[in-house]
Image (cartoon, rainbow, N blue to C red):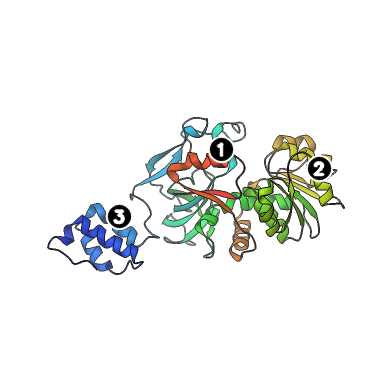
Amino acid sequence: MRDVGPFGARNPRYVAGLILDAIETDAADVHAERVREMAASAPLLLRRVRSALNPQKEITMSDNRARAVRFDRYGGRDVLYVAEIPMPVPKAGEVVVAVRAAGINPGEASIRAGTLHEQFPATFPSGEGSDLAGVITAVGEGVDEFAVGDEVLGFSWQRSSHATHVAVPTTQLIRKPPQLSWEAAGALYVVGCTAYAAVRAVNVTRGDTVAVSAAAGGVGSVVVQLLAVRGAHVLGIASPTNDAWLTAHGATPVHYGDGLADRLKAAAPRGIDAFIDCFGPDYVQLAVDLGISPQRIETIIAFQKAQEVGAKSEGSTSASTRDVLTEMANLVASGAIEIPIAATYPLDRVADAFEQLERRHTRGKIVLIP
């Protein structure tokens, strides 16, 4: 405990010292009343005081400014930057979420590079990001199912979640189960709903044998587990470094590379019933070559190839409902499914996060922590 000197109440260093004491002893209420009194005399430290006393309610630098990832033109990771923007204001039916975690996804890299301009054109300056989890800080007119302070997870369709704050319609949010970490909650939407849609697309039933490419990646790792939960025999195509993880999560590892078709046949002597591709067009062609019906071939990425061969290409949009998101969140919260977290990065290192993602050899999700 620190003694109050003759000018302690107006000394910013003293106020900061009390805050550090509270944080280090994990007892923010030790000096709570005294700190609140002194905060009025030390306005520059007011926000730091509030953050120490109420860490879940105050996680931004200013009441009227936020920070968000932006890019002004198509290009590589170097076009990404973090800008200070006006604090979002919720419209009717919306809330503002202070983002605690936001996953990044390959599609966002493709949009930023301009390779998806025909399907998903950008308007500059553009934001990015769909996945999010955080704490509600403001509610709009007509919102009665959520309140300030509620912990939520969900998604934005405005390319806006890679930010400290985002305004989101309540129809795109659910309550975060308390068992869920922020990282898992903030990474759930795209991989969870995409995996759900992919498994649904190939009409999996108990006892089916299903091959999955990129089986240890962000979506693939969830597809593998969801198939296992539904009683399928899963052939997980990945590198040898992922053997232990795949085996532990109910899949038979099959290594990619030359001779893959023979290895798949050896692993499934009675044949493969369905194929879910999470990597690219070569795997869609492989599925056709293996004699799998196009109606039981699903790709989450090779849309043109799917059209050529008559395969399916269901995406997260077809499963973007609160019911599906709730089901997936409950599966993760119960431990039935794991959301592997490959790495976390602060918002200012968004380019580094995408550099790791674009290597295409991560197991699980990469998450921004604003």
Tell me if residue 124 can be seen: no
Placement of 226 over or under 122, stated as above or below: below
| Residue under the point 67% across and 55% down | 244
Mark 1, Cα crowd under 10 Å, few <14 / some 14-19 / many 20+, is: many
Q: CA distance from mark 2 to mark 1?
A: 30 Å
In this view, 284 is above or below 133:
above
Q: Which residue is mark 2?
A: 261
Q: Earlier in the sequence, mark 2 or mark 1?
A: 1
Q: Secondary structure at mark 1?
A: helix
**Three-letter amino acid code at disc 3?**
Arg
250 or 298: nearer the eye? 250
User: Where in the figure is residue 107, as x and y percent of width and height?
Assistant: 59, 40
Q: Callout 2, which amino acid?
A: Ala
Of tags 2 and 1, the one toward the viewer is: 2
Q: Position of residue 54 (x, y in %)?
A: 35, 62
Dot 2 alpha-carbon crowd within 10 angstroms: few under 14, some 14 to 19, many 20 or more: some
Q: Residue at x 62, y 53 (%)?
A: 192
Which residue is labeled 3 in the image?
47
Relative placement, left or right, of 353 versus 328 is left
Mark 2 secondary-structure assignment: helix
Measuring from the top left, give residue 226's x and y in whole percent. Answer: 69, 57
What mark, if any, has residue 109 been given in the picture? 1
Quick one: label 2 or label 3, which is nearer the N terminus?
3
